[in-house]
Amino acid sequence: MPRSNRPRRVPSPGSPAGRNARRKWASAPPEVDLERTRAGLPRHESGPDGEWSVRQITAQNAAKDYRCPGCGVLIPPGTAHLVVWQEDSLLGRQAAVEGRRHWHSHCWRTRRRY
């Protein structure tokens, strides 16, 4: 059936369609947490030990136990930390992402650079 170019009828306020339409648009849109959004984007760091992608994990998103390769201590759930993988891996990008490690922020900043 072809589309009509006539404007749609506005439902009356008392009809069920009118109540649903008002309720749908009456609520304010949810606020966006910019810090949480930015935390998911990896930043690139370069140093004598290579090129790295570093992504911050917020305490809200940390759901599992991880062992920090810098100090060997467990990173418990609910602790903000970093996920790090090497950009210039000899085995390719996919292998580097699969070999990513979770670090304490302090341990990453103070790691030994070869």
Image (cartoon, rainbow, N blue to C red):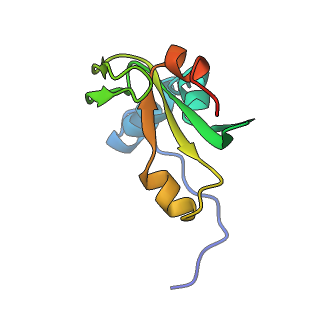
Q: Position of residue 111 (x, y in %)?
A: 56, 23
- Which x, y percent locates residue 36? 53, 25
Point out residue 22 in the picture as x, y percentages from the top left corner: 46, 32
Picture quadrant of residue 49: top right
Which residue is depicted at the point 64% across and 29% down? 113
Q: Quadrant of the C terminus?
A: top right
Residue 41 visible in image: no
Please tell me whether residue 102 is drawn above or below residue 106 in the rendered image.
Answer: below
Query: At which x and y percent is residue 102?
Result: 42, 32
Q: In percent of the image, x 45 and y 20: which residue is there?
A: 104
Counting labels gives 0
* Residue at image location 57% in from the left, 60% down from the top: 93
- Whether residue 81 sits left or right of residue 50 in the image: it is left
Residue situated furthest bottom in the rendering: 1
Quadrant of the image occupied by residue 20: top left
Depth check: give the residue in front, 31 or 11: 31
Q: Nearer the viewer, residue 104 or 5?
A: 104
Q: Is residue 30 visible?
A: yes
Is residue 31 left or right of 79 when viewed as pictured? right
The image shows residue 107, relative to residue 99, as above or below, that is above
The residue nearer to you, when weighing 41 against 97, is 97
Horizontally, is 51 left or right of 104 in the view? right
Answer with left or right where residue 74 lies relative to residue 33: left
Image height check: is 80 above or below 50?
Answer: above
